[in-house]
Amino acid sequence: MKALVVYKRKLQLRQVKEPVARKGETIIQVKKAGICGTDLAIVSGDYKLSKPVVLGHEIFGATTQEFKRIPEGCRVTTEINVSCGSCALCKAGLRSHCRNIETIGITRNGGFEEFVSVPVGNLRVIPRSVSDEAVVFIEPLAAAIQLTKMAQIHENSTCAVVGIGRLGLLILQVLKLSNPKSLVAITHHSGKDERSDLARSFGADEVYSSSEARTSIVDFAQGIGFDHVVEATGSPDGIDSALALVRARGTIHVKSTHGLPVSLDLTKIAVKELRVQGSRCGPFDEAIRLIQEKKVSTEKLISRRFPLVDYEEAFRKAAAPQMIKVIFEF
């Protein structure tokens, strides 16, 4: 079978043996898989890997055999963290922080291949009312939901999302469900573009360029700054924008996983008495429910589709500023 392998910034489409399921695992035949910002960071070399790996953690596929009441051919996706279940952190209920954790598509082979082996416990069955292409958004949508679990967004809060790319546009929709008093999107691109239009359609009261962002404090945050600022730029510079926009005793939600060191003004954090809250993977079941109930829209987020053999062009397009989501189709 074909698999897209990366190591030391080099992408290679290799012919490899089909995986053999380990104990407690099953094989998914991959149908679609999305290119994520983390995938781009790995290929650029910013996010370091210690060994060659098949990328891809936004996966839609079908089971290839019946296993534990999940029938063959069942439409599924997979959670990406594979935990041991026996270390102290797992026993404390922190399985996503397992000391022996493997991450599908990052530290163990992922979905940019025709078949992938995953733990049965990681599988999530997809309802018929959720489209095939919507499934590739379940993992990033779950990550968007997780920020609201780590620091609650109260009704009538003032919120800003810095960065309206693949993840930022999902975050806007999730925040809108909390009924904020104001919701503003900040983009690094000037002028009218598709992302800005989508941000407005997903609930943003206004979209500002980063150079106009100070205006948003006056218009939408009573001149004192936002209660919640989500940093989702995928850039080391995003945290500076977040620090400028958040109010005293407000919360910065960090979502970027670009793998690069960041210069952080700790004095400003201390003086403004800020909460800086990271979050990562989130609840798949809730993400599936939001898509199923049409509370989150994904149809307009796919920019291009490619077969796996066109991986070079696919990654070039995925890295382009005007692109949102690029997916592989098998």
Image: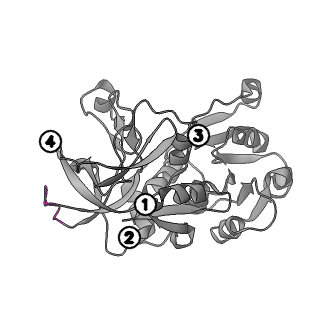
Q: Nearer the viewer, residue 232 or 178?
A: 232
Left or right of 201? Residue 54 is left
Where does the image place residue 296, in percent across and percent down from the top left?
51, 67
Secondary structure of the residue carrying tag 2 is loop
Where does the image place residue 314, in percent across and percent down from the top left?
53, 59
199 shown above or below 48: below
| CA gap, disc 2 and disc 1 | 21 Å
Mark 2 or 3 closer to N-term?
Answer: 2
How many numbered badges does the structure rendering display? 4
- Whether residue 321 is visible: yes
Secondary structure of the residue carrying tag 4 is loop
| CA gap, disc 4 and disc 2 | 28 Å
Q: Which quadrant would residue 250 be assigned to in this image? A: top right
Badge 1: how crowded within 10 Å, few (<14), some, or many (20+)? some
- For disc 4, the marked residue is 23
Q: Which residues are magenta?
A: 65-72
Where does the image place residue 47, in percent across and percent down from the top left?
54, 36
Mark 2 or 1 closer to N-term?
Answer: 2
Residue kind at label 3, given as amino acid type: His
Membership of 156 in magenta stretch? no
| CA gap, disc 1 and disc 3 | 26 Å
Secondary structure of the residue carrying tag 1 is helix
Badge 4: how crowded within 10 Å, few (<14), some, or many (20+)? few
Q: Residue at (38%, 55%) from the top-left corner?
A: 284
Mark 4 or 1 closer to N-term?
Answer: 4
Where does the image place residue 133, in percent across and percent down from the top left?
43, 69
Q: Nearer the viewer, residue 249 or 198?
A: 198
- For disc 2, the marked residue is 132
| CA gap, disc 4 and disc 3 | 33 Å
